[in-house]
Image (tube, helix red, strand yellow):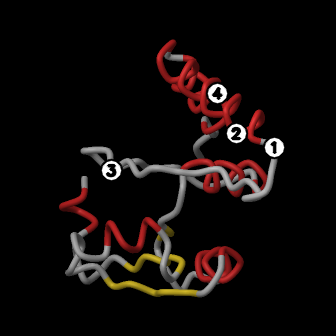
Amino acid sequence: SWEKINSPEVKLAVIDGSGAARILQPKLTETSWVVVPSSDGMFLELESGRVDALVTSDAQIADYLNSRGRGTLIIPEPVERQPTNIGLRKSGDQKLHDWLDAELARLEASGAMDEIWAKYTTVAAD
């Protein structure tokens, strides 16, 4: 739970300016935060034992855990979601932009987006 994490004994690494930092630091005021400039720095903090856990997207954590073959993905309740985005060239193909918008809306409406996230963010726990 977020209440268990909101403790001075818990040390979390987070990327400076990330969505996770902006959303969670104001809510977890008792937690000890280590703010780093990059994903590499965040993972090094965890690997070196200087933090207890890191806070980032579930997809990034799943990729990290699968590559290491160890660790645990924990999603505290209630789940805190944040939007994501796709970057396209401003001068890019408008047809591609329109197609992406329509396809993402279709996937969301059909429930397929949740299935995709579940498939690619599932990791084996220790």
Q: Position of residue 97 (x, y in %)?
A: 70, 39
The three-letter code of the residue at mark 3 reads: Glu
Label 3 and label 1: CA atoms lie apart by 34 Å
Residue holding disc 3: 80
Q: Position of residue 8 (x, y in %)?
A: 25, 83
Q: Secondary structure at mark 2?
A: helix
Residue holding disc 1: 93
Residue holding disc 2: 97
Q: Residue at x 81, y 43 (%)?
A: 93
Mark count: 4
The three-letter code of the residue at mark 2 reads: His
Q: Position of residue 78 (x, y in %)?
A: 25, 44
The answer to whether residue 89 is left or right of residue 100 is right
Q: Secondary structure at mark 3?
A: loop
Q: Residue at x 33, y 85 (%)?
A: 32
Label 4 and label 3: CA atoms lie apart by 19 Å
The answer to whether residue 57 is left or right of residue 26 is right
The three-letter code of the residue at mark 1 reads: Asp
The answer to whether residue 110 is left or right of residue 86 is left
> Mark 3 vs mark 1: which is more N-terminal?
3
> Mark 1 vs mark 4: which is more N-terminal?
1
Circles 1 and 4, Cβ within 8 Å, touching? The answer is no
Circles 3 and 1, Cβ within 8 Å, touching? The answer is no
The answer to whether residue 40 is left or right of residue 49 is right
